[in-house]
Amino acid sequence: MVNQDELKRIINRIEAMENQMIDFQSKITSVPALSPVNGGEGEWVKAMVIKDFLKENGIDDIQQIDAPDKDAKNGKRPNLVVRIKGKSDQKTIWLMTHMDVVPEGDLKKWDSDPWEVVVKDGKIFGRGTEDNQQSLTSSIFTAIAFRQEGIQPEYDLGLILVADEETGSGLGLDYILDKHSDLIRKEDLIIVPDAGEPDSAMIEIAEKSIVWFQFTTKGKQAHASLPNKGINAFRAASNLVVRLEKLHEIFDDKDEVFDIHYSTFEPTKKTANVPNINTIPGEDVFCLDCRLLPHYKVDDLMKEVRQICDGVEKDFNVKIEFETPQLLQAPPATPVDSEIVGRLKKAIKQVYQVNAKPMGIGGGTVAASFRQVNLPVAVWSTIDDVCHQPNEYAIISNMVNDAKVFAHVCLQK
């Protein structure tokens, strides 16, 4: 249940601040927050710009949590925690976004300077405008709207603006959860607006486990006219690719929460072996991308893959080694009937007139860090998903309307 008069006032305030939201996007886009790993200085300057902006708009309950990084400006990667007092402190509704962005990439593919916002056709163009500045802006202006209207949310409202999301979260959310484990309580509600669909209809509650395999098959190089003197690593590796299809039969469960409701095992990258046609390769390398339904154990997948490799080794007299450039066991899903999912569904319905559906995705998001410590979290926003692309943009109406959804969630009793 929502006080409709308070909701109307908050919505009117958010709509009235549209130009301020665009100006804010312009300001923070001009301050690239790139990880030192990506050739930048980190988030320090951007965090200070945001911190000053919040204070200018009457929000001064700001905690700064610095993760040490000798390669970053001032040797720190700042994380900001912002609070607005609610009518009750029994729980906090958290909106978590990230301040860092990815590099601009090939400038020739951009129609404008990626670090200078261009506003055109109802969109804001620039690096980071969608990922994750659209939601960061929506979150901040939700808090500002409550403050300016003098309305308290039903429960405390908290914003977590993290560093390092684009390069692993070790100095961002993971650092906060490790060093400040008392910040978020089990009764709190968490929204991570860092994934979504253009129609607002997806509430992400689950992720698949991710395992990337790189297989190296070793045989013996020889002239192609003398195959008896060699061991063809390419032939053995090709047979391995086919035998790995058996994984679909072993891990054959289905989960209708996911759009692709089964585990996937896709051969992907193939590296060059020999440069000429008339040589039998003595070594061959290929990769496999696996997305495992979360109730399966990654350890069980590793055992099955090793057993398949052993069979190929025996039949082809080769040696097969593999490594896992990425390995992530998915945490348990957020329950479909959890409170945060229910609140989001009600808010999305009123603002967007859409019946949103809890779903799982094949990729990974930072929300997994919350689920790893048994904190239910929902991932939702309204985006075209042009993040990391040239000419990245945020749709202005999405930025405004998502703020209305956040406000609605905060006003529900």
Image (tube, rainbow, N blue to C red):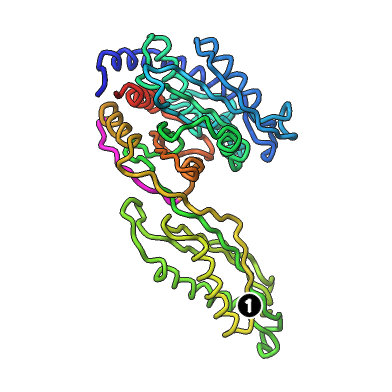
Number of numbered discs on residues: 1
Residue 53 drawn above or below residue 391: above
Q: Quadrant of residue 29?
A: top right
Residue 104 in view in this figure: no
Q: Residue at x 59, y 43 (%)?
A: 168
x%, y% of residue 175? 60, 36
In the image, residue 345 lies in the stretch drawn in magenta: no
Residue range corresponding to the magenta coloring: 353-362
Q: Which residue is mark 1?
A: 233
282 lies left or right of 209? right
Q: Is residue 355 magenta?
A: yes
Q: Quadrant of residue 4?
A: top left
Crowding around mark 1 (Cα neighbors within 10 Å: few <14, some 14 to 19, many 20+) is many
Left or right, 74 with respect to 62, comes to right
Instruction: Give the vertical position of 402 relative to 320 (above or below).
Output: above
Q: Residue at x 45, y 30 (%)?
A: 394
Horizontal and vertical percent position of residue 297: 47, 60
Quarter the C terminus occupies: top left
Can I make out residue 245 in this image? yes
Left or right of 70: which side holds 286? left
